[in-house]
Image (tube, rainbow, N blue to C red):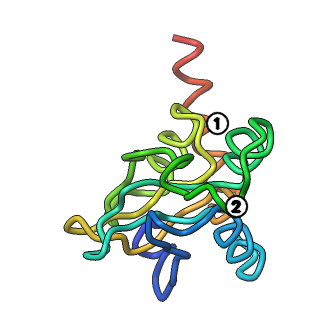
């Protein structure tokens, strides 16, 4: 079974400092074709996550100026994260239970990647569905 380390191998996640503006974060997400930014401090430690959903719900819907608002002002602070050894079904379970689309992968306090639901195969989704069905019948 695949683990998070297999999924993020050779990955360069989009990471920006807290001081980056929402506009710059959105432009970087568009350029990289990703839906999230990992917010890190100078040592590479995860401080938060900023997503496209945050841009809509926390910035645009509130009438904030994307150029004047920093991602630190609207990010999800201290997000859940997983270790590189977390297996694919556990990843999906954590995403489902937490309502997440993305989960950062952290090793020794440093960000090494990010996993999205789309990174996981149909077989892994089917196994989680099967497990869920078993629990529901019990």
Rendering coords of residue 114 (x, y %): 50, 66
Instruction: Name the residue located 56 percent from the left edge and 23 percent from the top edge.
Output: 134
Which residue position is annotated with label 2? 118
Rendering coords of residue 95 (x, y %): 55, 43
Rendering coords of residue 25 (x, y %): 64, 69
Rendering coords of residue 71 (x, y %): 55, 57
- State left or right for residue 48 relative to residue 53: left
Which residue is at the far left?
A: 108
Q: Quick one: 121 or 27, which is closer to the camera?
A: 27
Residue 62 is marked as: none
- From what the image shows, is residue 1 above or below residue 98? below
Q: Quick one: 80 or 19, which is closer to the camera?
A: 19
Q: Residues within 10 Å of mark 1 (few under 14, many from 20)?
A: some
- From what the image shows, is residue 80 above or below residue 12? above
Instruction: Name the residue located 72 percent from the left edge and 45 percent from the top edge.
Output: 64
- State left or right for residue 57 relative to residue 72: right
- State left or right for residue 132 relative to residue 53: left
| Label 2 secondary element | helix
Which residue position is annotated with label 1? 129
Please report contact status of discs 1 and 2: CB closer than 8 Å, yes or no: no
Residue 121 visible? The answer is: yes
Q: Residues within 10 Å of mark 2 (few under 14, many from 20)?
A: few
- State left or right for residue 83 relative to residue 2: left
Instruction: Name the residue located 73 percent from the left edge and 53 percent from the top edge.
Output: 65
Which residue is at the far top?
A: 138
Residue 3 visible? The answer is: no
- From what the image shows, is residue 101 above or below residue 17? above
Q: Nearer the viewer, mark 1 or mark 2?
A: 2
Q: Quadrant of residue 82?
A: bottom left
| Label 1 secondary element | helix
């Amino acid at each position: 079974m695949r683990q998070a380390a297999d999924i993020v191998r050779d990955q360069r996640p989009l990471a920006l400092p807290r001081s980056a503006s929402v506009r710059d974060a959105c432009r970087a997400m568009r350029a990289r074709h990703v839906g999230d930014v990992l917010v890190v401090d100078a040592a590479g430690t995860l401080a938060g996550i900023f997503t496209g959903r945050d841009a809509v719900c926390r910035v645009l819907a509130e009438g904030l100026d994307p150029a004047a608002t920093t991602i630190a002002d609207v990010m999800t602070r201290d997000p859940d994260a997983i270790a590189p050894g977390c297996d694919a079904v556990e990843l999906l379970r954590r995403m489902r239970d937490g309502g997440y689309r993305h989960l950062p992968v952290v090793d020794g306090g440093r960000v090494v990647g990010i996993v999205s639901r789309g990174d996981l195969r149909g077989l892994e989704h089917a196994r989680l569905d099967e497990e869920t069905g078993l629990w529901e019948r019990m």
